[in-house]
Amino acid sequence: MRSPFRFAIGLMFLSLSIIGLFYLWSLRTENNSRIDIVGIPPATLQPTATPLPTKTPAPLGNPTRTPSAVFASAPFRGVPAMVEAEWPARLEVKNSGTVRVSIVSISNGYILTQVEVQGNKALASTPVPVGTPNQGLAAAFGNEYQAYAIAHIAGASFHIELASPEEPQSLNQSRLDWIWNITADNPGLQSLDVSIEVEWRHVGHTEEPLIRQIWHNHFQVDVFQPLITTGQVSAFSLVSAFIGSGLSIPWIYETLKKRKPKPRRKEKTKQ
């Protein structure tokens, strides 16, 4: 009776090992099963042509290059801009997720939201208009100012770690990115607030800069606690496989031992 019982126990633990490994695989692929894009109507997901500002012909001759003339060639001067954002819709407790916001110059005439982290939600919107209309962010208050942008994030339920430069970034470039890594200790629907401010500094003067908030958004993240965590599944699979192997080996040994033919005894001849 012992051999079939050991076989049944070993088979049970082997089955549990296979189930545990399958569950581990499903956990790792759950968050990567879909990419959601929100905040943009479906029609705008296709490339949409945006009229570019007309450029006036440069005057003949060699005019003196002033600081304002140099800054006027920046990507965000006279060119529309867009704010991209992405964040994890669902996040496992103790696991890390990525939040990104970007200011992108759309001088190429197309608006198309990009998701850089698979499984994240994405959003695209235009900044709040400030200063002179149709002059772009960098030249919103005139060419005598040089513009710098900085992003802020707040979420009391998260541990937040900055993964990009912390200091303000100049708008003299076609794209600006801010990236954070977030983790949560408790399950539930948690909130994040992200905003972008632009600071216009007057060139050649020491007056106080002009600061305006050009974008703000509120993100929600569903933080969940699985019944069995990834680490627990891995440990359980190893232990169950070990126990199952340990219980199966004696049964195999006893089965082979019973099947081994017994040597025949030689009968003694009577004298």
Image: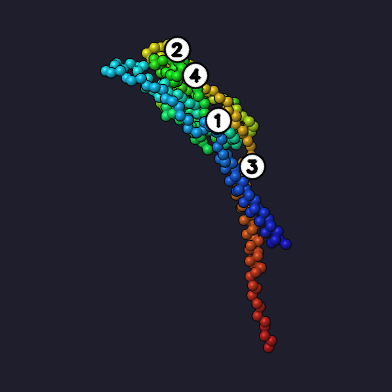
Spatial CA distance of label 2 from label 3 is 55 Å
What residue is disc 2 on? 208
Spatial CA distance of label 4 from label 2 is 21 Å
* Badge 1 element: loop
What's the residue type where badge 2 is placed? Answer: Glu
Spatial CA distance of label 1 from label 4 is 21 Å
**Between tags 1 and 3, which lies in front?**
1
* Badge 4 element: loop
Residue 31 vertical placement versus 15 (above, below): above
Q: Residue 132 in the image: state x and y as whole percent.
A: 45, 15
Q: Return the residue nearer the eye: 156 or 176.
A: 176
Furthest-bottom residue in view? 271
What residue is disc 1 on? 41
Furthest-left residue in view? 61
Spatial CA distance of label 1 from label 3 is 38 Å
Quadrant containing the N terminus in the rendered view: bottom right
Q: Earlier in the sequence, mark 3 or mark 4?
A: 4
Quadrant containing the C terminus in the rendered view: bottom right
Q: Earlier in the sequence, mark 1 or mark 2?
A: 1
